[in-house]
Amino acid sequence: MMYLSLKLIHILSAIVLFGLGSGTVFYKVMTDKSRDHAAIAVTSKHVVLADWWFTTPTVIIQPLTGILLADQLSASFGDGWLWWTVVLYLLTGLCWLPVVVLQIRMRDIAADSLAQGRPLPYLYSYYSKIWLWLGVPAFFGMIGITTLMIFHNSLWS
């Protein structure tokens, strides 16, 4: 029962992490393309909130439940699939940390320029491009992690 409970939490957390990441990218990119300054300010604020409320807890839950599940399965970090999962998770995290900083900066830039009645400065779109390009390896990292989680027995048996 403990194993199934951990697995359920792990899977639901992965769904929230991956789904929220994909959703925030879609809404932020679409809002930025609209060039609607007020919408950009609100969406930027909500992207930061979503990261704090949902992404941060799942980033903590994933390794905790993953370690407990690996222990339940008597899996070793010497197992190829588990080693690659950890490597991809760490690389994805290295992309995510600067993304969080950029999101906060973009939120503040959008809010400040809107409050002052000024157009969005070039710095906002510069940060947005970096944000998007950091998301590309993170996205494929999550695809890789999910693939390893699902097919690990088939790939390494």
Image (cartoon, rainbow, N blue to C red):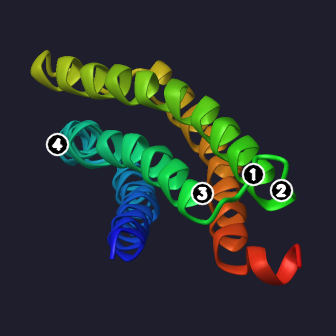
Q: Amino acid at mark 4?
A: Val
- The answer to whether the residues at label 2 and label 4 have Cβ atoms under 8 Å apart is no
Q: CA distance from mark 2 to mark 3?
A: 10 Å
- Give residue 116's position: percent from left, percent from top: 14, 15
- The answer to whether the residues at label 3 and label 4 have Cβ atoms under 8 Å apart is no
Choose mark 2 or mark 4, whichever is in front: 2
Q: Which residue bears the numbered disc 1?
A: 76
Q: CA distance from mark 1 to mark 4?
A: 45 Å
Label 1 vs 4, first from the N-terminus: 4
Q: Which residue bears the numbered disc 3?
A: 70
Choose mark 3 or mark 4, whichever is in front: 3
- Give residue 47's position: percent from left, percent from top: 29, 44
Q: Which residue bears the numbered disc 4?
A: 42
Residue at image coords 45%, 51%: 62
Q: Amino acid at mark 2?
A: Asp
Q: Secondary structure at mark 3?
A: helix
Query: Which label number is shown at residue 79?
Result: 2
- Give residue 83's position: percent from left, percent from top: 79, 48
Q: CA distance from mark 3 to mark 4?
A: 41 Å
Q: Is residue 79 above or below residue 117?
A: below
